[in-house]
Image (cartoon, rainbow, N blue to C red):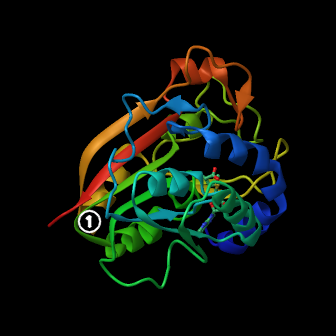
Amino acid sequence: MTRDYLSINKDIWNADATNWVEFAKSRWSLEVPAWGNWGNSDAGLQLLPMDMTDMDAIELGCGTGYVAGWMNRRGARVTAIDLSAEQLSTARQMSEKHGADITFIEGNAEQTGLPDASFDFAISEYGASIWCPPDKWLREAWRLLRPGGRLVFLGNHPLSLICSPLDGAPADRTLHRPYREMWGADWTEVEYEPTGVCFNLTISSWIDLFTDIGFAVSKYQELYAPESAMGTRAAIPADWAKSYPVEQVWHLLKHE
Ligand SMILES: C[S@@+](CC[C@H](N)C(=O)[O-])C[C@H]1O[C@@H](n2cnc3c(N)ncnc32)[C@H](O)[C@@H]1O
């Protein structure tokens, strides 16, 4: 990927931010977190510690900031960084409305400028987890965490990318791309619903990278759409997402 994905993705999110305000309102209003494009229930997933009292937590690519809001509600001191000033504007409005206390930073999650070992917990839900090259943002997350600190991130399952046609049409049951040497996809010039540049890896490449950086995998979850799901979200039809894993969640531990 030689294109300037950072400015491409920043422009796209600034331009798209108004389309995420209603979504932000509904997620910020939830008592119990719901995750990913299909709003999977937190029951059984538990992406966040139940009690985050006295924890320093960071959300990397926070968008409208509802995950940061949930962490703050559980007692954490929260920092949330995003590249898009427009997304952060929504996040700040929501935070104020819900009485949250969050430090928002406009910046790049690959290079936050924050001190080493300053967080106990880091998370990304469709933020840095898909919009940044894994080798860059994962090293930054590792640097930011204290020894024994945890990183949880959610993004597209590699299988959903393989089954996505090259023109951006909704995923189907054909293998449209090679799995081998997967790096992600450039969606900027596709025919259907163009967007930015996204990153992903094969499962073994993810694990090799975690090991190289110094993370241990404590849990890996594959998410499907709930049985009640209908329609198409992020170019994945509900029927596809009920039969195949549409999203993945990695739970990582920084070695002591
Ligand atoms: C889908 S949204 C974030 C998800 C969040 N959970 C939400 O739905 O509001 C993706 C966000 O990633 C941000 N982003 C993309 N690249 C980034 C980078 N390099 N550093 C920080 N944020 C980034 C975008 O600006 C956008 O706000």
Q: Which residue matches tag 1?
A: 212
Residue drawn at 38 percent across, 47 percent down? 48
Query: Could you say which is closer to the camera, residue 180 or residue 112?
Result: 112
User: At 56% across and 60% down in the image, what residue appears?
Assistant: 100
Q: Quadrant of the C terminus?
A: bottom left
Mark 1 lies within 8 Å of ligand 1 (Cβ measured): no
Seen from the viewer's position, the closer of residues 256 and 199 is: 256
Residue 22 percent across, percent down from the top left: 78, 44
Query: What residue appears at the point 32 percent right and 63 percent down from the top-left corner?
Result: 55
Residue at the extreme top: 227
The amino acid on which the numbered mark 1 sits, given as a three-letter code, is Asp
User: If the picture is divided into quarters, which one holds ligand 1?
Assistant: bottom right
**In terms of depth relative to the viewer, which is nearer, 207 or 148?**
148
Q: Residue at x 33, y 82 (%)?
A: 116
Exactly how many numbered labels are in the figure?
Answer: 1
- Mark 1, Cα crowd under 10 Å, few <14 / some 14-19 / many 20+, is few
Residue 70 coordinates in the image, percent (x, y) = 50, 50
Residue 139 x/y as whole percent: 37, 71
From this viewpoint, is residue 183 visible? no
